[in-house]
């Protein structure tokens, strides 16, 4: 018996929509990262882009456990001495709350050219409007997968 290795003809990409309202950020990011890589498929091949296209709505309503909303800091310019931090709460309440989810998913993926390509298949929206109805996405209910995925304040 030989090991199966996927070719571009074997890849079947789906569109998935995830509602982030009330879902814990880290658990949501790990499930999205798994879907982007394609590890949920039995034909997973590590060096191929096999993952699904993922749409995340209600990113501004994601839940963060503990004191991370006030204590976790983001942002560095990339230059020496370029620390300009904002807390997670400031970003979620600010102009672009979807950046928290995008950054969490990005950090769950391994670094490299393939992961950067897989990140282009992620679309994150702060509200419920997404404009991707033409792709007919399937709903993935992350909140009902595990009771720990949701948190009430």
Image (tube, rainbow, N blue to C red):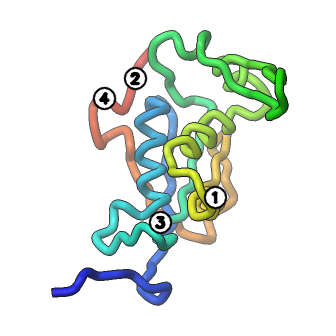
Residue at left offset 36%, top offset 33%: 149
| Front residue (pair 24, 3) | 3
Q: How many neighbours does mark 2 have within 10 angstroms: few (below 14), some (14-19), or many (20 or more)?
A: some
Q: Position of residue 115 (x, y in %)?
A: 57, 58
Contact? badges 1 and 2 (CB < 8 Å)? no
For mark 3, what is the residue?
51
For mark 4, what is the residue?
148
Residue at left offset 46%, top offset 33%: 26
Horizontal side, residue 45 vs residue 74: left or right: left
Q: Quadrant of residue 71?
A: top right
Q: Position of residue 56 (x, y in %)?
A: 57, 48
Image: 98 above or below 83: below
Q: Position of residue 96 (x, y in %)?
A: 75, 34
Horizontal side, residue 78 vs residue 89: left or right: right
For marks 1 and 4, the one nearer the N-term is: 1
Query: How many numbered discs?
Result: 4
Element class at badge 1? helix
Image: 29 above or below 112: above
Distance (Cα) linking label 1 and label 4: 29 Å
- Residue 116 - label: 1
Q: Residue furthest front?
A: 80
Residue at left offset 57%, top offset 54%: 55
Q: Disc 3 or disc 2, which is closer to the eye? A: 3
Contact? badges 3 and 4 (CB < 8 Å)? no
Horizontal side, residue 102 vs residue 11: left or right: right
Element class at badge 3? loop
């Amino acid at each position: 018996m030989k090991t199966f290795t996927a070719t571009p003809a074997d890849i079947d990409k789906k569109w998935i929509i995830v509602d982030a309202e009330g879902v814990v950020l880290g658990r949501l990011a790990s499930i999205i990262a798994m879907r982007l890589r394609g590890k949920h498929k039995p034909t997973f091949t590590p060096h191929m882009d096999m993952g699904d296209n993922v749409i995340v709505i209600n990113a501004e309503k994601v839940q963060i456990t503990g004191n991370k909303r006030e204590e976790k800091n983001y942002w560095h310019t990339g230059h020496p001495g370029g620390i300009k931090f904002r807390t997670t709460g400031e970003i979620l309440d600010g102009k672009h709350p979807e950046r928290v989810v995008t950054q969490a998913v990005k950090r769950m993926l391994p670094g490299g050219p393939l992961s950067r390509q897989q990140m282009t298949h992620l679309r994150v929206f702060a509200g419920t409007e997404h404009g991707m109805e033409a792709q007919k996405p399937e709903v993935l209910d992350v909140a009902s997968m595990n009771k720990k995925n949701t948190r009430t304040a």
